[in-house]
Image (spheres, helix red, strand yellow):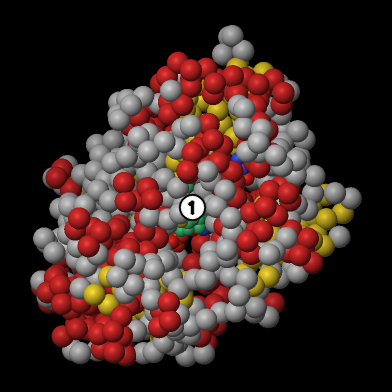
Amino acid sequence: MKTDTICRFCSSCCPVVAETENNRLISARRKSFLPDERQLICPKLKAAADIVYSPERLQKPLMRDDAGNFQEASWVDALDRVAEQFLQYKKENGAESVCWLRGMAADWGAPWDYVNRLMNGFGSPNSIGNGSVCHVGREFAHTITYGAMTVPLLQKAKCILIWGKNDRDTNPMAAEAILHARQNGAKLIVVDPIRTYFAARADIWLQIKPAHDGLLAMAMIHEIISQNLYDAEFVDNWTVGFEQLAESAAKFPAERIAHDIWLDPDLIREAARLFATTKPACIVDGNGLDMQVDAFDATRSVAMLRAMTGNLDVKGGDFIPQPVPARNIQLQERMPAGVKPITGAYPQFNVFNATWGKHVQSCVVDAILEEKPYPVKMLVSQSGNPVVSLMDAGRVERALEKVEFLVVIDKFMTQTARMADVVLPASSCFEKTQLNRAYLRNRLVRIQNQVIEPLGESWPDWKIVFELGRRIGLTEEFPWQTVEEAIDYQLEPAGITVQMLRDNPDGISSEDMRFEKYRSDGFNTPSGKVEFAPLKLEENGFTAVPYDNGYVDRPISFSDQQDQYPLLGISGARSNRFTHSQFHQVPSLYMNRKGCVVDIHPDDAEAYTIAEGDIVRVETPRGRIVMPAKISTDVHQGSIRIAWGWGDLSPDLSLNRLTDDDRRNPIIGTPSGRSFMCRIAKERE
Ligand SMILES: Nc1nc2c(c(=O)[nH]1)N[C@H]1C(S)=C(S)[C@@H](COP(=O)(O)OP(=O)(O)OC[C@H]3O[C@@H](n4cnc5c(=O)[nH]c(N)nc54)[C@H](O)[C@@H]3O)O[C@H]1N2
Ligand SMILES: Nc1nc2c(c(=O)[nH]1)N[C@H]1C(S)=C(S)[C@@H](COP(=O)(O)OP(=O)(O)OC[C@H]3O[C@@H](n4cnc5c(=O)[nH]c(N)nc54)[C@H](O)[C@@H]3O)O[C@H]1N2
Ligand code: SF4
Ligand SMILES: [Mo]
């Protein structure tokens, strides 16, 4: 039997067709607009059955006994225990002492809405997502500039600027669209410290010094303004703060900053001119900009490049999405005004979007360890592996040791789950129906369909949340016995039902695509225009225009200790076989640790007498890891790249043992974990 659904093994949310026999998943195939021979293969999807039926899947709830050992338990006992703890902590320490931390895996959408509903209904404002290291900080930067996060319309673009994104390995749908546009003659510019697949094929590759993207963007803005290459009609009529932007950008001309960011000033100017004069153009910005302490202004200045060149909301440019009118079910209105979340230091970021919720996960660690701004005593960690994925993993581990009661909801026994008091087994994406946020953002709604029964006694996340909600007294808030009922309620304002979505496997459009919507509706900002100098920032004590007071101090961690840590370490590469810390236990993907390497430039390898395959030790003031070396000219001399995601196998392979969480972006709370000074030495041959 074939069923249309959505894969959630990573955040790309690809539409797929799953094939089953007798309630067993056999295989799944990605839908693509390209003919078979030109499609990219996703190894994770190819291994779908190996993942779903992995012998390591958790199939029963686990509870610790008095001796501290896990014992299998019934759902009734496990959920009763969790609910009892919720109510106990509320009584003794206030509801806000209970926190729910969500990783990226279950989905960015419905499961979060349900959790936020549960937590708001319970009375705790502390339902925290991990978006400050992922794209939510970037989304805020777009939103404050022009009211929404844009979608690059790659297939019709004539010029594509890829900025800190590696779609070939992280999003095959987007990569296929880029390849298609390229075949139709689109120009390609790549900003990346690494020679990625697309960097190697670009017209211009800017091999930037990591963490210095804001400077490059300002230099490009300056070049475009000084050469009169901006869209004057758009800027005059649809933007505010352009003069202030021009003044700030004039402090960063290419010839002044190029050397400091490892680039050639002529190449910067050429890239700026190519981007500004080839229409339509779009910018694909990615996680290379996130996870930097400067993420907010860097992303904001990149967003401004889009706007000033007149590429917003045009065919082949950067589209302003048309969100599906879904019901906001999060019950934010239940939270009394005086109750501050643990992320209270980031007030604008907490509320910039009606449904995104709160996202500075580092605050969870502060609240447990330092009891700042107040203590968190109980933590639920759902669909994330914070001991591996949060910056300064050693500190995270200390926090999870300290927290009084830890519940983990996962498919596997991760490093985080091992520390739990109760572990609840979650079903995989093929075992549940779900409303996926990616498909609410912009017009076309698709449904993620359950294609097989949940494995063993695992439960879908929605069911865990609904059942727990009812146990802590939220019976009216969670009246739904099936997820279909909940989704029908959420989609009622759009006039779409689950049945309609099942009848239309390629999705239902909530409305037709409209371009240049700002001409009739304005932009969704306080001024109704693109804001190069948002007043909202100034009112909160920040500079309105990016870098008005000069460039950010020390964008790279530990740069004050360069004499001892002379090499610049960066986080990567993300392999297309894995999603963060996931799937390393699946033999067909593990492939004897292929790709678990430190990339080092030949000149540095020679200086440190390191040969290909040698086992090297990488150290920072926070910790050390040990991995084989790979000699490669894909990295810039003076920098090394450390494979990301292997930390669930061993702390020795865990990149975040090296990173720090000391300095955070004051607006979005992002630490500087992607780029850090480190040292390397041969451990053994
Ligand atoms: N150094 C460094 N740190 C990083 C990154 C980096 O590149 N470098 N990337 C950052 C980014 S962008 C992100 S988004 C985060 C990701 O960090 P996390 O959100 O922690 O992501 P994963 O490591 O993939 O862990 C997801 C967990 O959810 C489980 N899971 C999978 N599907 C489901 C499900 O349907 N339900 C439930 N309940 N559980 C499920 C998986 O088994 C896995 O244990 O890491 C960030 N940290
Ligand atoms: N296979 C796979 N796919 C995934 C994931 C996964 O873990 N595995 N994770 C999913 C998630 S949650 C996310 S957020 C996305 C992320 O996907 P992407 O946005 O593609 O993120 P990365 O691959 O981490 O990094 C993108 C690029 O940024 C570059 N980079 C590093 N530092 C800098 C810098 O300072 N400046 C610039 N300009 N570039 C820099 C890296 O070299 C890399 O080529 O992928 C999603 N898809
Ligand atoms: S890229 Fe692969 S793993 Fe990620 S959603 Fe698409 S098919 Fe699934
Ligand atoms: Mo992410």
Question: Where's the N terminus, which quadrant?
Answer: bottom right
Q: Is label 1 in a helix, a strand or a loop?
A: loop
Q: Amino acid at mark 1?
A: Thr
Q: Please give left or right for residue 326 compared with residue 202 in the image.
A: right
**Residue drawn at 43 percent across, 70 percent down:** 150
Quick check: 152 above or below 424?
below
**Residue indicated by mark 1:** 355
Q: Position of residue 21 (x, y in %)?
A: 87, 54
Given the current orientation, which residue lies at the most extreme right position? 22
Q: Residues within 10 Å of mark 1 (few under 14, many from 20)?
A: some
Q: Please give left or right for residue 645 compared with residue 82 in the image.
A: left
Question: For the residue with label 1, is its CB less than 8 Å from the closest atom of ligand 4?
Answer: no
Question: Where's the C terminus, which quadrant?
Answer: top left
The answer to whether one can see residue 624 in this image is: no
**Residue drawn at 23 percent across, 58 percent down:** 537
The answer to whether one can see residue 541 in this image is: yes
**Residue drawn at 42 percent across, 66 percent down:** 149
Q: Position of residue 680 (x, y in %)?
A: 28, 45
Quick check: 501 above or below 222?
above
Between 447 and 119, the residue placed more toward the observer is: 119
Quick check: 489 above or below 365?
below
Q: Position of residue 573 (x, y in %)?
A: 43, 56
Between 150 and 421, the residue placed more toward the observer is: 150
